[in-house]
Amino acid sequence: MPEAPKHDTTPEEHRKALKFIEDVTMNAEEVQRRVLSEILKQNSCTDYLHRHALKGSDPMAFKRRMPIVTYEDLQPDILRIANGDRSPILCSRPISEFLTSSGTSGGERKLMPTIADELDRRSLLYSLLMPVMNKFVPGLDKGKGMYLLFVKSEARTPGGLLARPVLTSYYKSRHFIERPFDPFNVYTSPNEAILCPDSYQSMYTQLLCGLVQNTEVLRVGAVFASGFIRAIRFLEKHWPRLARDIRTGTLDPEITDRSVRDAVMKVLKPNASLADYIETECGRDSWHRIIPRLWPNTRYIDVIVTGAMSQYIPTLDFYSGGLPLACTMYASSECYFGLNLNPMNKPNDVSYTLIPTMAYFEFLPLNRTGSAELDHRDLVDLVNVKLGHEYELVVTTYSGLYRYRVGDVLRVAGFKNKAPQFTFVRRKNVALSIDSDKTDEVELHAAVRNAVNHLEPFGATLFEYTSYADTSTIPGHYVLYWELRLGGSTAIPPSVFEDCCLTVEESLNSVYRQGRAADGSIGALELKIVEEGTFDKLMDYALSQGASINQYKAPRCVKATPVVELLNAKVKSNYFSPKCPKWTPGHKQWNKEN
């Protein structure tokens, strides 16, 4: 007897979204041609295109004449805009604001120009996430999401434009604040708590609202894994206060933001049994599986755990008891790129499908040394990449970036119709990363060089060093391993090594210093002094693993567990930075002018 036909319960809006994905991936080549033509036509009057002899919307002329560029190539034009030049320099439409990238240039955040239309494109990508997720985890419209979302500091350029992170821009936009009710996207956090600029008050009230509604929560998350783990650490420290507020139905007096207090009091009611439950679970010896214990109906954690965030997977597994980790989308300050069409895959199997309407995508093939070719004639279109090959992503956006090197290395993992699916391999040149910070070897070396000056009065020199991003602590922190040659008779006081730590931190970029000083997302830098001969042992280990003695050089950053264990076994003493480095919003040159 044949089965009765299954009733399709997919909401109409979800069907439309899934059909859109199907259409644009099936016609990826045609869509990409249209996108490039639209960008060139829209920006045909700009200084930048005229400078490269492009005055129309001819894609072939674009491919012949347009160079591949980095941020440093565009920086003079960007600074003209930042300083108030309103002529069509990069884009014909008014630059609405700058999005501050977590990548750095000269120790400062990069400024990415954007236009009002881009918010529509970002909102479109967000609107595709739940239709995809609902295919794998049905019934998410029957509960809520506990998403811990935060805004960060803003600055204004000398020309009066806002400069702020892309997520802060989105959360403060009407697209987010005035979003229509969607049963698949109901959050436990009120907008007022998300938009609160005080990170303590925002975190406290968002966790409080999530606990009050704990049985309604079906999914939990944050943008990055590091941020979600920081929230758990905050909960470990403050759960007695949170439980007290739930027991009494009153809000802690340290929450002083009036709009936040009013919003939270709409959901906070006295609940002694829930307070007892929270105190029992949080008071246990181990916090293993604390997430499903406190939020028993949680079906997955929505966080980015690809790239540098993969180092947090073991910690997430400990707190969640192995709940699925969903990486839903791939985006940056320059552009929102695409989404994960199989969001319940294991982190190692995550791949992102680039949505062809978001920008014009090209790819620089990596050569055998892992470097990208710089000749624009080697660029490959979206539909012509090859399975298994690695490429550096290059984008042309509606906002005025043309053949811009994003710096992400991607590997082709498969195809959705005609559109490729990519796994994120790495961020180019990044040695250390804890949160949104990115520190490369050149910057690290300069910071270390500044710090070792403190050792000269004691006749000590730095023989060799390496570094490690330690995420076993919450928040994570940078660790430096130094092997010294001691030439003086005077012992080096601990305060000198602490000064070395602080000097390194003061020398690092503004994203790192903001994470330390303002966001609390990065812990104090740690300096470990190792025994003489430690780096010889490190070389011996590398040679035993097949490294060539002729090509070996000490790594400036280490990740493999055996290497870290070897270094830690040789530590004689360790020191921490005694205070946070200096940081102020905006760029150094703006602050000087102000």
Image (cartoon, rainbow, N blue to C red):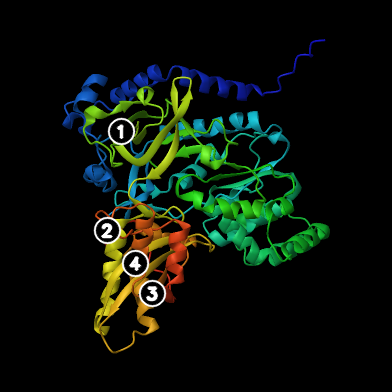
Q: Name the kind of residue labelled 4 in the image.
A: Phe
Above or below for 504 versus 3: below
Mark 4 or 2: the one toward you: 4
Label disc, if present, on residue 167 of the rendered structure? none
Q: Residue at x 26, y 68 (%)?
A: 449
Residue count near mark 2 (Cα–Cα under 10 Å), binned few <14, some 14–19, many ≥20: few
Work out whether mark 4 precedes mark 2 in sequence or the reverse, and give the earlier one.
4
| Residue placed under numbered mark 1 in the picture | 365
| Residue placed under numbered mark 4 in the picture | 535
Mark 3 to mark 2: distance in Å? 36 Å
Mark 4 to mark 2: distance in Å? 40 Å
Work out whether mark 1 precedes mark 2 in sequence or the reverse, and give the earlier one.
1
Which corner quadrant of the image does residue 18 belong to?
A: top right
Work out whether mark 1 precedes mark 3 in sequence or the reverse, and give the earlier one.
1
Residue count near mark 1 (Cα–Cα under 10 Å), binned few <14, some 14–19, many ≥20: many
Q: Provide the secondary structure element on which disc 3 rests.
A: strand
Q: Provide the secondary structure element on which disc 2 rests.
A: helix
| Residue placed under numbered mark 2 in the picture | 589
Residue count near mark 4 (Cα–Cα under 10 Å), binned few <14, some 14–19, many ≥20: many
Residue 185 appears in view: yes
Work out whether mark 3 precedes mark 4 in sequence or the reverse, and give the earlier one.
3
